[in-house]
Image (cartoon, coloured by chain):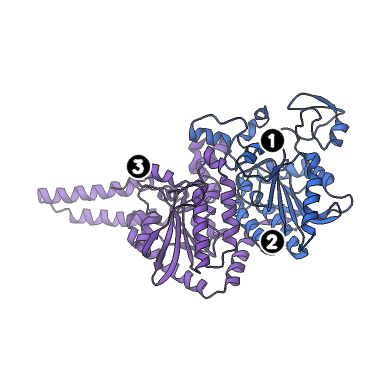
Chain colours: A blue, B purple
Amino acid sequence: MIKGLFVKKKKYATIPTGKVKQDVPEGIMSKCPECKHIMVTKELRKNLLVCQACQYHYPMSSQERIAGLIDEGTFTEYDADMISKNPLEFPDYVEKLESDRKKTKINEAVVTGEGQIDGLDVTLAVMDSRFRMGSMGSVVGEKITRAIEKAIENERPFIIFTASGGARMQEGVLSLMQMAKTSVALKRLSDRGLLFISVMTHPTTGGVSASFASVGDYNFAEPKALIGFAGRRIIEQTIRQELPEDFQTAEFLLKHGQLDGVIHRSQMKKTLGTLLKIHSEGRR
Amino acid sequence: MAAELEFERPIHELEKKIAELKSFMDEKGIDLTDEIKRLEEKLSNLEKSTYSDMKPWDRVQIARHAERPTTLDYIGYLFSDFIELHGDRLFGDDEAIVGGVAFYKDIPVTVIGHQRGKDTKENLRRNFGMPHPEGYRKALRLMKQAEKFNRPIICFIDTKGAYPGKAAEERGQSEAIARNLVEMAGLTVPVICVVIGEGGSGGALALGVGNYVHMLENSTYSVISPEGAAAILWKDASLAKKAAESMRITAPDLKELGIIDEIIEEVKGGAHKDAKHQAELIDQVLETSLHSLLAMSQEELINQRYEKYKKIGQFGFVNDSIVVK
């Protein structure tokens, strides 16, 4: 089932090198990778990239996510021109970044900015798994931190859509420290009484799962998203037993009390809008 | 007897040879004083060059040494009246993390650290120093208690990583680590972290958001183990030595990357050679750090921590004159 999709993902949660298998569908017709249902691509897009037959949620690019979520014409991007260096002088890293920039038309694995949802102001960060598997290096950490600082400055809620294999190995321990950097900023946001909503999308693992993704005032996830700390293969090797099929899915986390809810993509904007409205009434 | 480390073998061989010559001299009554003196000089030079030019992989081996002093060893040397406190009040007590209250000189403090074992039996009990969520939640409980009673917190970091197991995932390993990062950021008391062995990824960082982060000279701090990195990069875990060099995981590397504050000198050949003396070397740095933090207000402590982490990272902009490469 869902397993077959992530064959390349089953390595180690912190190490995102594999390509995203299911990019945005091309062509007039699209075949659902889950149930093989054939759909008109245009219809699929209108349906926010959710299969009409089996409700499989295709991975979304940051551009598509923002278009589907933020009120038209209200989005302003922050720090779009920030790019990674190669602090460890890692072989091939610069080339890989360059090729991902070309492929995705974005400069790094997260897009940040501000806009409105149902007319209410939000600060937003959307990770993009097409770019280095959404992994977090210095730029991702810095952009998210700056976005949180903007939210504090403007006294606005902060919403993040995560999609990440974890810390970016090519920047070594600098990547690890971005977990701490984003956390100190989130603490300041929280101390100011501001709202933080985390929406985990497929996949959210390793260092991203073990930092900002898991500490929202509300933690949500998209159906069947892979969410976890350690990689499935590592765990199977460690405990020497097979894991249940739904292990580390959004539904699994919900069952174990780690999520406030699993939200279908068609209900996402509405749910966030309602929450924002609840928080805009009363004191904040 | 400590297990022999690969890079120390030439030293041990020379030591053995000297010992042999000495006993030969005593037995046969032949004067070999000059020869012995020459070899001893050679040994001294060899030691100097070996220990002053340690390769990353040599340090990894020392950091992992079975007899390397652990959190409880240092607690014994550095603190008095230590009372260990157990349990997270939610699920259980994880012995891969120890914590409690004690006096540091005459200052009441809270001490927390990863705890691995030195033999198989203790390692099984301690889960090889790889915590479950309840370990991190116990640590957080003790930190919050320290904050309530205005006690400084000292954390010792020594883990291969958070435990990658089924139960750990079910109980929210990610959330436990993430929560500690956020809550440590806001503590109103001084927090000093010392990496004493291996600092393995998020599982280490979950005790590592401090006002000061120091590392013992031969400890490591990394996003992934050298074996893990090698397996990913070259599909071959046996290339760990090469990975250790390219990943920049040693104390001098982290100092250069602007992540840690001070490198704490180790006794010659590694902390395991003389734990008591090593504790004294830690003591010197700890005392200075603690006193400088005790002079700060609650707000200053939180802001100092904020600025410390905010500045970690390297990035550029598309239009920079010197772009990447």
Determine the chain carrying the residue at label 1.
A
* Left or right, residue A60 beside residue B24: right
For marks 1 and 3, give the CA distance: 40 Å
Identify residue for label 3.
Answer: B121
Q: Are marks 1 and 3 on the same chain?
A: no
Checking the image for residue A224, the label placed there is 1
Q: In which quarter of the view is residue B48 placed?
A: bottom left
Give the residue drawn at x 59%, y 61%: B185
For marks 2 and 3, give the CA distance: 45 Å
Q: Which is in the foreground here, disc 1 or disc 3?
A: 1
Are dots 2 and 1 in contact, CB under 8 Å?
A: no
Residue B234 lies, in percent from the top left, at: 56, 36
Give the residue drawn at x 50%, y 62%: B145
Q: Which circle's residue, 2 or 1, is located before the other in the chain? A: 2
Residue B284 lies, in percent from the top left, at: 41, 68
Q: Residues within 10 Å of mark 1 (few under 14, many from 20)?
A: many
Q: Residues within 10 Å of mark 3 (few under 14, many from 20)?
A: few
The relative height of residue B119 versus residue B44 in the rendered view (above or below) is above
Give the residue furthest to the bottom. B295
Q: Residues within 10 Å of mark 2 (few under 14, many from 20)?
A: many
Residue A52 lies, in percent from the top left, at: 81, 30
The relative height of residue B281 versus residue A238 in the rendered view (above or below) is below
**Amino acid type assigned to the residue bearing label 2 in the image:** Leu
Give the residue furthest to the front. A282
Identify residue for label 2.
Answer: A189
Q: Are marks 2 and 3 on the same chain?
A: no
The relative height of residue A50 versus residue B242 in the rendered view (above or below) is above
